[in-house]
Amino acid sequence: SILDENEMRHVDLRVTDRGVVVEFFALPRSPLFDAVDQPTQLMESLVRAVAVAARGIPNSMAVETHTAAVPVVVAENPVWNSSTRQAEEIRRLAIQNGVETDRIERTTAHADRSLIVSNPMSVRNNRVEIVFLRK
């Protein structure tokens, strides 16, 4: 396997109407991005594994990022800018690891608008989806 057991704890695969979704998610004390939205070593390993797998899959790809909500006590909610920076970092990392630029059809920053667990501030809502799009 390209990923070790610890890395695999952060991965979920599913088939949807959009295509095959490879989801990477943060866990407590095991984030995907640091405080300034740079990918952690874990995130770099996960993207590298997808880039290797992508060599055998001809489909176009999409990158989607999601963030947990933050307590809104600040003048401007940071989740949109954070999610946007994260999407760009994943796109850049995928290309750096061999994914052809034109295969990435889009990047989408969802911020905290599409939660996967009901607690909006749960770390589990911090996730990246790389979608191998249906043709």
Image (cartoon, rainbow, N blue to C red):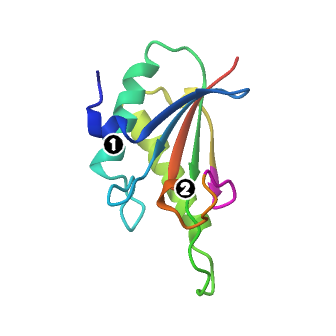
The residue under the point 35% across, 35% down is 8
x then y, percent, for residue 12: 49, 34
Q: Is residue 114 left or right of residue 42?
A: right
Residue 63 drawn above or below residue 80: above
First of labels 1, 2 by sequence position: 1
The stretch in magenta equals 109-116
Furthest residue to the front? 118
Give the label on residue 118, or none.
none
The N terminus is located in which quarter?
A: top left
> Identity of the amino acid at label 1?
Glu
Q: Residues within 10 Å of mark 1 (few under 14, many from 20)?
A: some
Residue 16 drawn above or below residue 88: above
Q: Residues within 10 Å of mark 2 (few under 14, many from 20)?
A: many
The residue under the point 55% across, 67% down is 121
Give the label on residue 125, or none.
2
The C terminus is located in which quarter?
A: top right
Residue where numbered disc 1 is placed: 44
x then y, percent, for residue 16: 68, 27
Q: Is residue 134 left or right of residue 34?
A: right
Secondary element type, mark 1:
helix
The residue under the point 51% across, 45% down is 128
